[in-house]
Amino acid sequence: EWNRLLDMLPSVFFRKSDKILKARYKLEDIKKEFQNPSAYQDSLLSDFLRLIQISKEDFLTAVQAGVTGQKTTIRKRIQHNIDSYINEPFSEFYDAENIVLSVDFDTNTAYFSVQSNDGQSLLLSERSNGLRWYLNTFIDAKANDVTDSSVLYLLDEPGILVLEYK
């Protein structure tokens, strides 16, 4: 009986910090973050890469300026994996509008943008606080293996967290 009762309870996901995926990452900042992750506890980049199954080394290669066969292959794999591991499942989770997250690489910088129903792409930082909060929470939960539909999300003062995106 006890095990049956436990099976009925939802799993719990507690977001300890307000991790965010920024709209722009410069190569030198990415290197610093990868070398000292504890200094970047509010960054979602490492979780994002783990979710889309891209190594830090491959991401660094993709961000480096220039075009080579290797960089092109990695960049295409990154976008394919974003589509598979984020865009497709996020469309089932967030139905306010169709959202497509993408990453572009230019001059030693990775730019994250979102395209919506009207076809216009905007940098992630140009989108609403609400959408960014949903997207970041989704990425954080998925990267931490929260896949059950019966989940209790615990958020410490989410209203304050949304305001801090500005």
Image (cartoon, rainbow, N blue to C red):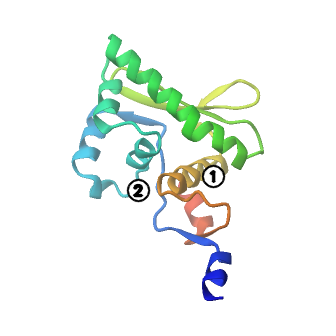
Quarter assignment of residue 12? bottom right
Point out residue 147 in the picture as x, y percentages from the top left corner. 58, 57
Residue flagged by tag 1: what amino acid is it?
Tyr
Residue 135 is at least partly visible in this image: yes
90, 65: nearer the viewer: 90
For this view, does 54 lie left or right of residue 90? Answer: left
What's the residue type where badge 2 is placed? Asp
Question: What x and y, as percent, mark residue 57?
Answer: 28, 34
Question: Residue 39: which quarter of the image?
Answer: bottom left
Marks 1 and 2 close (CB-CB < 8 Å): no
Q: Is residue 94 left or right of residue 14?
A: right
Residue 73, percent from left and from top: 40, 18
Instruction: Report the residue marked by disc 1.
Output: 134
Judge left or right: residue 60 versus residue 142.
Answer: left
Whether residue 124 sits left or right of residue 28 in the image: it is: right
Mark 1 neighbour class, 10 Å CA radius: few under 14, some 14 to 19, many 20 or more? some
